Image: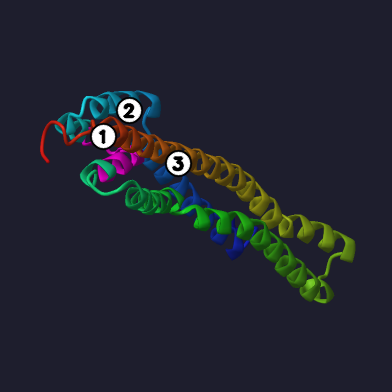
Amino acid sequence: MRAGGFVMWIILALSIGAGAVVLERLLFFRRASTNPVLLEERLGKALFEGDRDTASRIVAEGKSSLHHLFSAAIAHWQIDAETLKLLLEQEIRRELFRWEKGLALLGTAARLAPLLGLLGTVLGMVEIFRLLPESAASPMITLAGGIWKALLTTVAGLCAAVPMVLAHTYLASRVARAEEMLERGADFILREKLLGRSSGNGPVAKGKP
């Protein structure tokens, strides 16, 4: 760290910040995820039977994004299908905003780390050539001794950037899967709404009006 200079400490701080973002996102993804097949199966049964109380209890059991989406739909079940579709789209955007939080910061850190490493190397080279005329040793010895130190920041920047890029790619893929899950959930709830209307059945048949 001393040989690399102050840029090494910036890269270290950037790495720690990126690591904190990745850890927080992984914990959030775990809380916000659920088994969509099982949830839709249970909720679909309650909606088919017209039991709003059971449907409300099912969607209130979890804290996942899909639970939040279904909870908003059940709470506004009396509105027409077109309005419900707009409501679900709004809920999906709100949930995706929660899923994408911090990813822009992680992507920025992944791009900055190698640039900072390159900056540190250039500054090191400038310092080497500045001191070269004052050096009592051979110019080649002075250059050889200084260049490897200057290159340390480039190595550090690349070593920090590689895991950041991998983490960002993985987290972005999780967000994409979450978006697909929410879109499928919205299709499911709209289908149940239309089927309930056409059959004269639905959550209003039992429970609260």
The mark tally for this picture is 3
**x 14%, y 32%: residue:** 53
Q: Image check: 156 left or right of 12?
A: right
Q: Image check: 3 left or right of 204?
A: right
Instruction: Judge whether residue 49 is colored magenta.
Output: no
Q: Which residue is mark 3?
A: 183
The residue closer to the viewer here, 19 or 205, is 205
**Pointers 1 and 3 in contact (CB under 8 A)?**
no
In primary-sequence order, the first of circles 1 and 3 is 1
Picture layout, residue 164 above or below residue 133: above
Going by the numbered disc 3, the residue's amino acid type is: Glu
Nearer to us: label 2 or label 1: 2
Q: Which residue is mark 2?
A: 39
**SS type, badge 2:** helix
**Pointers 2 and 1 in contact (CB under 8 A)?**
yes
Magenta stretch, main secondary structure class: helix
The segment highlighted magenta reads 59-72
**Label 1 crowd (10 A; few <14 / some 14-19 / many >=20):** some
| Residue 193 image point, x, y percent | 31, 37
Picture layout, residue 39 above or below residue 142: above
Q: Which residue is mark 1?
A: 62
| Residue 64 image point, x, y percent | 32, 38
Going by the numbered disc 2, the residue's amino acid type is: Leu
The residue closer to the viewer here, 184 or 176, is 184
The residue closer to the viewer here, 94 or 112, is 94
**Label 3 crowd (10 A; few <14 / some 14-19 / many >=20):** some
